[in-house]
Amino acid sequence: MAVTSARSIVNLKEKGHFERENARINKYTLADELPAQLSELSIRTMSQPSYTIRTISPDEKDRVIKFLRRFFFRDEPMNLAVNLLETADSRCAELEEYAASTLEDGVSVAAVDENEDYVGVIINGIARREEADYTDKSEDCPNPKFRRILKVLGHLDREAKIWEKLPSCDTVLEIRIASTHSAWRGRGLMRVLCEESERLAHSIGASALRMDTTSAFSAAAAERLNYKRIYTVLYADLPYAPQPDPPHTEARVYIKEI
């Protein structure tokens, strides 16, 4: 999935911590997805590893960034298209700052295994109608490669016009980055993390969620989760945009009213 609205990566606003008295911890096992017929046939299955869903504390920034460096930053199509991380040891401070910029909103969630290691994360943020700002913040970015990515994200933010499409909504929860450990993919983990994000959206009084997708895979995930597409642009139609390899030919904006 993708980073979403292009918030400034310099002079980020101080944000109060989200009160999480309603935060819920759920425990799941990967066997939850197995067909019911298995039990009817009395087929023996090996013990499956379990995971817990919980909110991410702002104090976990370093852990979150370390996870994203391993499982998201190097796979995201626009990052690849501009060769943002040139070597195995390369880092992009602007990307890392951007990725962590909404942790203080208190609405990001993680799946952790029995050793408390991350196996999946969703970085969420809170967008409010009265704070909408469509100025081009990419010019503030000193990294020319990441500046091109921010410019695309800013384009999505302006052209999607989500507040016009949500006239009675004043608060939206943005699903900004979603990533799972490669060994845990294809097991429904992202669906559970998105469901928890939707519950958190309810708890803060948001009446919609937003997801911007920059890859064919994240777009397919949004469709499976019943998000509604409200804007699409081909990378080829934006002269400044990175040009990812197919099938990642377009960026989209989705919303889901709740």
Image (cartoon, rainbow, N blue to C red):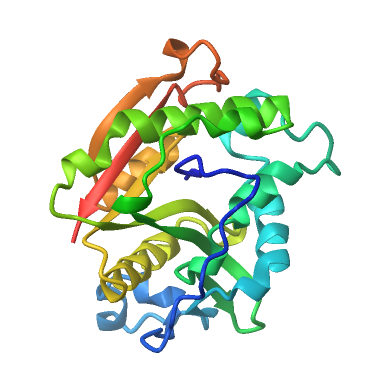
Is 196 above or below relative to 219? below
Is 135 above or below relative to 180? above
Residue at horizontal 76%, vertical 35%? 85
Which residue is at the front of the view, 97 or 219?
97
Image quadrant of residue 149? top right
Is 144 above or below relative to 99? above
Q: Is residue 134 left or right of residue 60?
A: left
Q: Where is residue 101 in the image (x, y as percent from the top left)?
A: 59, 56
Q: How many labels does the image show?
A: 0
Q: In this view, does 234 lie to the left or right of 185?
A: left
Is 60 above or below relative to 239? below
Image quadrant of residue 91? top right
Q: Is residue 200 left or right of residue 108?
A: left
Residue at horizontal 67%, vertical 33%? 141
> The C terminus lies in which quarter of the figure?
bottom left
Residue at horizontal 58%, vertical 67%? 119
Q: Where is residue 230 in the image (x, y as percent from the top left)?
A: 23, 35
Which residue is at the front of the view, 31 or 127?
127
Q: Position of residue 196 (x, y in %)?
A: 36, 71
Residue at horizontal 61%, vertical 48%? 98
Image quadrant of residue 208? bottom left
Which residue is at the front of the view, 119 or 14?
14
Q: Position of residue 121 (x, y in %)?
A: 53, 63
Q: In this view, does 3 lie to the left or right of 229?
A: right
Q: Can residue 44 be seen in this view?
A: yes
In the rendered image, the residue lying farthest to the left is 168
Q: Is residue 223 visible?
A: no
